[in-house]
Amino acid sequence: MDIISLTLTELREALRRGETTSVAATQAMLDRIVALDNSLLSYLTITEEMALEQATAADQRRAAGEDTPLLGVPIALKDIICLSGAPTTAGSKILEGFNPPYNAFVVDRLLEAGAVILGKTNTDEFAMGSSTENSAYVTTRNPWDIERVPGGSSGGSAAAVAAGLAYGALGTDTGGSVRQPASFCGVVGIRPTYGRVSRWGVVAFASSLDQVGSFGRTAADVAAQLSVIAGHDPRDSTSLNIPVPDYEAALTGDIRGLRIGVPREYFVEGIEPDVEAAVRVAIDDLAALGAEIVEISLPHTQYGLPVYYLIASAEASANLARYDGTRFGPRAKGADMIDTVRQTRALFGPEVKRRIMLGAYALSAGYYDEYYGRALKVRTLIKEDFRRVFESVDVIAAPTSPATAFRVGERIDDPLNMYLADIFTLPLNLSASCGLSVPCGLDRQGLPIGLQLIGDTLQEARILNVAHTYEQARPRDRRLPAVPAGATG
Amino acid sequence: MSLSRDEVLKIAGLARLALSEEEVARFSDQLSAVLDYVARLDELDLRGIEPSVHAVARTNVMRDDVVMPSLSPTDALFNAAATSENQFLIQSILEE
Amino acid sequence: MLDRYEPVIGLEIHAELLTHSKMFCGCRVVDSVEAAPNTAVCPVCLGMPGMLPVINRRAVEFAMRVALALNCEIQNHNIFARKNYFYPDLPKGYQISQYELPIGRHGWLDIALSDGTTKRIGIRRVHMEEDTGKLTHRDEGSLVDYNRSGVPLLEIVTEPDIRSGEEARAYATRIRQTLRYLGVNSGDMEKGVLRIEPNISIRPRGSEAFGTRIELKNLNSFRALADGTDFELDRQAAVLDGGGKVIQETRGWHDTRRETFSQRAKEEAEDYRYFAEPDLPPLFIDPAWIQTMRATLPELPQAKEARYRIDFGLSPVEATALADDRAVAEWFDAAIGAGGKPKSLANWILNDLFRLLNERGLTISDVPLAPAALVELQSLVDRGTINLTTAREVLAEMLESGRDPTTIIEAGGLGQISDEAALIAIVDQVITDNPGPLTNYLGGKESLLGWFVGQVMRATRGQANPALVNEIARRRLEEKRDTAGS
């Protein structure tokens, strides 16, 4: 048995049947990280000691007859999710050396479920970006072509899962930061409905948009993790107090009669022909599987990007005000107290500064109504688009991103062009919908393309089942991308 | 809509960000471009439209007035750049 | 100055709420003066990354009670906002507060002035927010203690209806008393749990436009509030009289020099960039909840004062003194309920009881004295079982031991002697023992009657019924006259 090639759910079965151990699986991942991550740069911190302890404990529990949903399964965390006992940087110099005295809610859930934490994966600084190039530490590479970005901001998690450096991983999705890198790296990634997963202990970017999601090689892998991390947390006032279904049990492989809407606004301006073609083929496949395809309209789609940037930046400008060097993080030396805070905050990278500035401006006296206030109203229109569409369809199918993975450095100096990578993912973050990306082929350069499936509020089980059914009908090449060993500069 | 150097400096002041001259110039250009882009929202007639602050509507989420354990001062101060007398130490703020 | 200028004063009061835990986290609300620094802090109130607020229900209910007591309309749709500014005592870089939709609006509070009139002060808004940490200063730098960070805070803002230091003081005193009545604040200004900041300006009489206002801080007593306000009014008048202009600034009150001084000029209005707090869903307060809260309101001091005056015939001074403290007022009410007579009870409480408590440095809540016991003591005096002197001694004993007056009187043999035969014997003995005064009395110096009564009281260690002794002594002395004359 090649332990590396197993999916999360396959590994879980192997562990249950006693065919392998958690220590073996964990060690295999750690060895592979050592071998390949110098070129991939997907991890910022490897919690080797903690992982092996957890794996040993998991094997002992297994031997004692216990079984929990993720017992002994090695998983990676985006480095924006707090894990007590390891640093959390959010990809920023301003949190260098920060050791949170708490676990995120999702981490507690993973640990209760028996998961093994391999380490913390790279992210754009404070999850602001679409390529991990905004990480203050490294730029993660796409396992399919290390000259290209893995997408972002959860690019480290996506790349790690794609390259077989973790069986599953958590990321966060504020405007597409799970789905877009999942698409770029050829894995499955879900962004649950806002409030489905607690934000407690997840470093905030934009409070009304942030949500934790999971990555896996299959829809089932994603479902297994989501079943563990979803649920009510009284410490997050926006967490929904609604029972969590068994997402794995919902994977019936039957989508007959399901009404799938295809929004015409997602097949215009700038979409790469290979992407459009692959997505259309996938939609035909869904029709062949018994779904009814209907054309729909989400008329305010084009306003999603400006609304998103105003709202996310405004919230971020406040969320990031706490980084002043007083209670945690490094401190610069300024002429006086105020100057010290200004110099300390100069540790933020350019994209973070840009968004803080945009957010502060959009909220400032005389501009609130014109920018932030207006964005909130258009958000209502976008929510209304989704609400109306979901009156007549069960699921929306669309491309995840208009393009496949771009080259490192290609868009870094052009913020607006970079933002366009999220144009199809961010509208649902403004609404109460959920969405995932599932691989639907490669472009002519051999780069993965993602099919985005969007569900109504709390319809995660439904979109996971569509993805699963599609996977069963169109099985992918199970081989992992060939990542060259060696150091990447 | 273009942002002047003074406006950039004013916002940087509000946000307590020290910017280099080069950053001031670059942000002035980039933020102006972003503001031009977001100006497309002006096309919409938003009369009578309510703002949406939250994605999902919850209301009246409260906790009972119950005391929970606090951090030890050691844990509270662990991540601080400078401490003294079990407190966070910062540069002097002139007595008002 | 009052002939030329009209003072325009508004008060902002910040009151910490006496909840068990903080506004948005489970840390204990501690005495920020006494508690060791940073012992009541957690990742939430330290503003650590990824931490989220959850509203303390009791804080909301306390805020509602205050707003209702101040006759405010309760906002149905409450939202919290982020008020963005940087200061080291503000861990998140924003304060969670209420902005557009405060919990209470359009209220009022009546204050009594020294000339006997009443004035209504408008309450513009009552809103909930969180307190900041505390800074102290050392040679090496400034120290930050976040024990106070996140303690629920109520801000109560008046309309600019106040016209003098006296009015400011009367208003603030009434607010403090009301908060204490509601059990939501200790009123301790020294410890900063109640902070009062007036905005003060003057304008020429007849002018509609407001003058430039200053904000006055560092007021840690009501006297400082009154004196500081009056000082500032005079200072502004002098500035204007001298052809100068009042500048907008924050001024401090120097408690020993008894004057205000410039602290910080306000260059321009701060841009707080308020926006709705995305981490907190809105709070809808429905009429049923308001009704429940209204039902928990105690009788407020104004109502008690009025009842004491109108129903019980007490003087305004008595009524105010009894209603001043809720514990005393409720003790008084309980005593009335036990059948006490209001006027006499008021005397007992305001004179004897308060004196005894003051001597011991205690409050009414500290002593085991039951209201019914004082009523019993009062009726023992009325029935003549004991006299007033004895009653005062008994009261002191009741305060110490908590025993009822009858038990104390019986145990100590303190009952008043009203047995006529016994008293006649004592009176006769005193007359026999004092032939000289008797002669003088019979010779026309009838004022000596009092002297004889005094001798009898002394002989009975004050336990004799004085009225009865008086009557017997007069009768027996007159009988001597008849005997002598015959």
Image (cartoon, coloured by chain):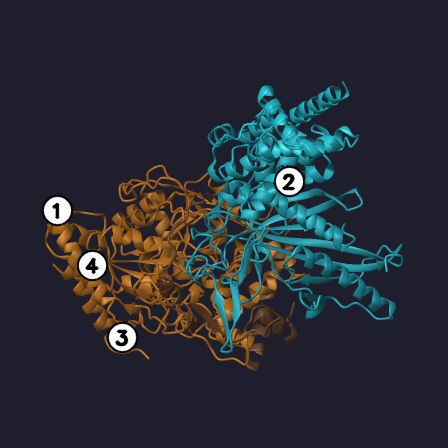
Quadrant housing the C terminus of chain C: top right
Q: Is residue C229 above or below residue A68?
A: below
Please state which of the two labelled residues, at mark 4 or mark 3, is closer to the viewer. 4
Q: Quadrant of residue C62?
A: top right
Relative height, residue C195 to residue C445 (above, below) = below
Colour applied to chain C: cyan
Q: Helix, strand, or loop for circle 4? A: helix
Q: Give the distance between the C-alpha atoms of the residues marked 2 and 3, in whole angstroms.
A: 87 Å
Three-letter amino acid code of the residue under disc 1: Gly
- Label 3 marks which chain's residue? A
Query: Residue C163: where, in percent of width, then height?
Result: 79, 53
Nearer to us in this view, C64 or A27 = C64
Give me the disc on residue A38.
3
Report which residue position mark 2 lands on. Answer: C351
Using residue A401 as the reference point, say whether residue C261 is left or right of it. Answer: right
Q: What chain is colored orange?
A: A
* Kind of residue indicated by mark 2: Asn
| Chain letter for the residue marked with disc 1 in the picture | A
Name the secondary structure under disc 1.
Answer: loop
- Residue A54: numbered disc: 4
Q: Residues within 10 Å of mark 3 (few under 14, many from 20)?
A: some
State the CA–CA distance, disc 2 to disc 1: 79 Å
Check chain identity for marks 4 and 3: say if they share one.
yes
Residue linked to disc 1:
A65
Nearer to us of marks 2 and 3 is: 2
Q: What is the C-alpha distance between the residues marked 4 and 2?
A: 74 Å
